[in-house]
Amino acid sequence: MPQRLGVNVDHVATLRQARRTTYPDPVTAAAIAELAGAAQITIHLREDRRHIQERDLRVLRQTVQTLLNLEMAATPEMVKMAYEHKPDMVTLVPERREEVTTEGGLDVNAQKDTIQKIVKNLKDGDIITSLFIDPDVDQVKASHKVSADRIELHTGRYCEARTEKDRQREFNRIVDASKTAGKLGLGCAAGHGLHYENVRAIAKLPEIDELNIGHAIVARAVMVGFDRAVREMVEILRNP
């Protein structure tokens, strides 16, 4: 089975917020993505609301026909937001206001009690809970201990590696982490920095069932249109 493609529409909202207009609308982009073969829509509602807004979450919850994955910080405010809008899945991510994009994974070991409590709250609300972590076997095991349903492996270091040796080392970390997740019964996704070339190796890993890709698809869409950009990525996942 090909991996499920989660299209992250955050950067459609980034374009909109650059001019504080009503377009382009991430809701429209999500609908096009679904028609083009996306099996999931992913959004990150940040504390500073730099791209996705509460309105987007509300309308997407009403319109997404596949799965809606809400990335959010592990805070009481965001748990309340999740309870109000009931996405199909929540992915807990680390968040700093000054970062351009998410710089790394959650340190589950260091925040075990807090994360365990939030995971329980979300699961009590019938929301599938995933943790965005670095591809580290210890973090995978910690995610299992706090009763997460799934993990998402941060692929940033793999994508940014400058040499083949570094790339292979980071790829091996992803392989080891995904295999550990499989043995523990955790669903396993991957994302961050993936594009139309470097995704191919990740798309061949059997333990990974979901890829969340946003920036590369939105950037490609500027050149060829959103429908084609999504269809091209779907085809790569089918035939990596």
Image (cartoon, grey):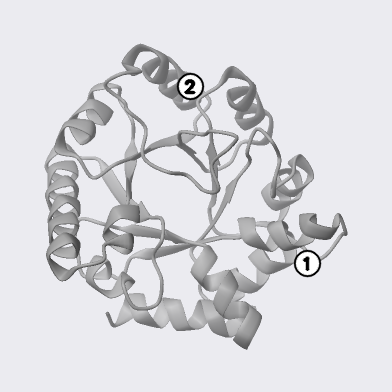
What is the quadrant of residue 48 in the picture? top right
Residue type highlighted by circle 1: Pro
Q: Is residue 53 left or right of residue 225?
A: right
What is the quadrant of residue 208 in the picture? bottom left
Which residue appears farthest toward the top when viewing the image?
A: 113
Secondary structure, mark 1, is loop
Residue at 55% across, 79% down: 220
Secondary structure, mark 2, is helix
Query: Where's residue 193, x and y in %?
Result: 41, 61
Residue 124 badge:
2
Query: Where's residue 68, x and y in %?
Result: 56, 50
Up-down: is 45 above or below 155?
above
Task: Give the crowd class for mark 2: few <14, some 14-19, many >=20 residues within 10 Å.
Answer: few
Up-down: is 174 above or below 233?
above
Up-down: is 63 above or below 38?
above
Residue at 29% across, 42% down: 134
Would you say the residues marked 1 and 2 are in contact, meaning their CB atoms lie under 8 Å apart? no
Marks 1/2: CA distance?
35 Å
Residue at 11% across, 42% down: 183
Q: Is residue 41 left or right of residue 28?
A: left
Q: Quadrant of the C terminus?
A: bottom left
Which mark is nearer the camera, 1 or 2?
A: 1
Query: Where's residue 34, x and y in %?
Result: 58, 69
Residue 102 visible (yes or no): yes
Residue at 76% across, 50% down: 59
Residue 24 badge:
1
Residue 7 badge:
none
Which residue appears farthest toward the front when viewing the image?
A: 162
Residue type highlighted by circle 2: Asp
Up-down: is 171 above or below 62?
below
Sequence order check, earlier mark of 1 and 2: 1
Q: Quadrant of the N terminus?
A: bottom left
